[in-house]
């Protein structure tokens, strides 16, 4: 299809050929969230952002833990409703789930690891709505933290691209973790258990075990360092919150 589009030289033919190729590919995933969203867009029926209402229904992926405690990972899109870019609300279905946690036999606490970008004007309202919800007494079963996954530091782009010195990189990482304007958010009770002892210890261990205490880290190594730390951080958050279920929640739940 790409060859035919190039030979025609017409933009419209290129768009059509791409659509044909994508349609053929998507037939292998007929029930996927992206397919449903594309169908809704074609029908022109979207008036607001609300992935649960658009049938991006949560599902259980797997469980992890020990004989004493087990945590279940739920695939969960952002449980919010948004009609204006500056205003978002948490949907009633998710609030109902949290209220039921008080009486549920298996789920008493849910940890929502929010992967949306709180530094972006497009996503800040959804982040704020989720972060604020846990401070209401009736939603005690909820713990929300926000991890930056789409910032210059996370991708090690300018002005951090040339920071090859390990000590400088690690110090920047610690500074960003404690700065909400850098895309991270931790409730005070959780932050007190992370900083400085846990963060310092894990970063020092990662540097020693995975990178042999090298003084210089390439960009690829720094990206690996961030992902390894995120993994240990997520496990620590499950432990701190005593979570029975948790979710790595991005905007649409398709990451």
Image (cartoon, rainbow, N blue to C red):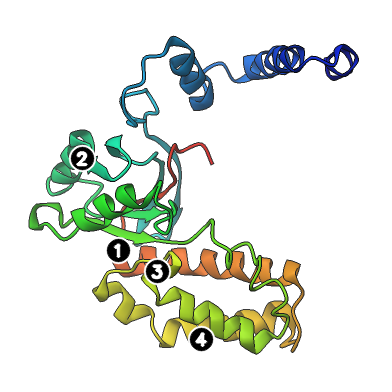
Please tell me in which quadrant of the rendered image residue 134 appears. Answer: bottom left
Residue occupying image coordinates x 46% and y 18%? 41
Which tag, 1 or 4, sits closer to the chain's start? 4
Asked which secondary structure carries label 3, the reply is helix
**N-terminal label among 2 and 1:** 2
Above-or-below relation of 50 to 23: below
Q: Which residue is mark 1?
A: 242
Ranked by sequence position, the earlier of labels 4 and 2 is: 2
| Mark 2 / mark 3, whichever is N-terminal | 2
Report how far apart the C-alphas of labels 2 and 3 lie in the structure. 30 Å
Q: Earlier in the sequence, mark 4 or mark 3?
A: 3
Name the residue nearer the viewer: 29 or 41: 41
Q: Residues within 10 Å of mark 3 (few under 14, many from 20)?
A: few
Measure the alpha-carbon separation of dots 1 and 3.
27 Å
User: Which residue is found at the position 36% from the left and 20% from the top?
Assistant: 46
Characterize the local packing of mark 4: few (<14), some (14-19) or many (20 or more) Cα atoms within 10 angstroms: few
Q: Disc 1 to disc 4, how far (Cα)?
A: 21 Å
* Residue to which mark 4 is pinned: 201
Q: Which residue is mark 2?
A: 97
Mark nearer the viewer, 4 or 3:
3
Distance between mark 4 and mark 3 Cα atoms: 24 Å
Q: Position of residue 108 (x, y in %)?
A: 21, 52
Q: Is residue 240 left or right of residue 230?
A: left
Q: Dot 2, crowdedness within 10 Å: few (<14), some or many (≥20)?
A: some
- Which residue is under mark 3? 181
């Amino acid at each position: 299809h790409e060859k035919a589009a190039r030979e025609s030289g017409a933009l419209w033919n290129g768009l059509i050929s791409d659509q044909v190729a994508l349609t053929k590919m998507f037939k292998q995933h007929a029930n996927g969230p992206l397919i449903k969203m594309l169908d809704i867009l074609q029908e022109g029926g979207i008036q607001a952002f609300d992935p649960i209402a658009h049938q991006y229904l949560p599902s259980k992926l797997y469980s992890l833990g020990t004989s004493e405690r087990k945590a279940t990972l739920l695939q969960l899109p952002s449980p919010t409703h948004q009609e204006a870019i500056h205003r978002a609300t948490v949907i009633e279905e998710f609030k109902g789930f949290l209220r039921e946690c008080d009486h549920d036999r298996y789920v008493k606490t849910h940890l929502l690891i929010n992967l949306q970008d709180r530094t972006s004007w497009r996503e800040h309202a959804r982040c704020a709505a989720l972060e604020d919800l846990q401070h209401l007494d009736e939603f005690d079963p909820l713990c929300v933290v926000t991890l930056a996954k789409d910032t210059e530091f996370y991708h090690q782009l300018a002005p951090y691209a040339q920071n090859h010195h390990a000590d400088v990189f690690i110090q920047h990482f610690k500074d960003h973790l404690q700065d909400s304007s850098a895309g991270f958010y931790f409730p005070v009770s959780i932050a007190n258990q992370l900083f400085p002892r846990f963060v310092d210890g894990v970063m020092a261990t990662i540097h020693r075990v995975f990178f042999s205490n090298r003084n210089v880290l390439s960009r690829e190594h720094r990206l690996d360092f961030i992902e390894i730390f995120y993994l240990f951080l997520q496990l620590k958050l499950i432990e701190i919150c005593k979570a029975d279920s948790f979710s790595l929640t991005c905007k649409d739940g398709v990451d």
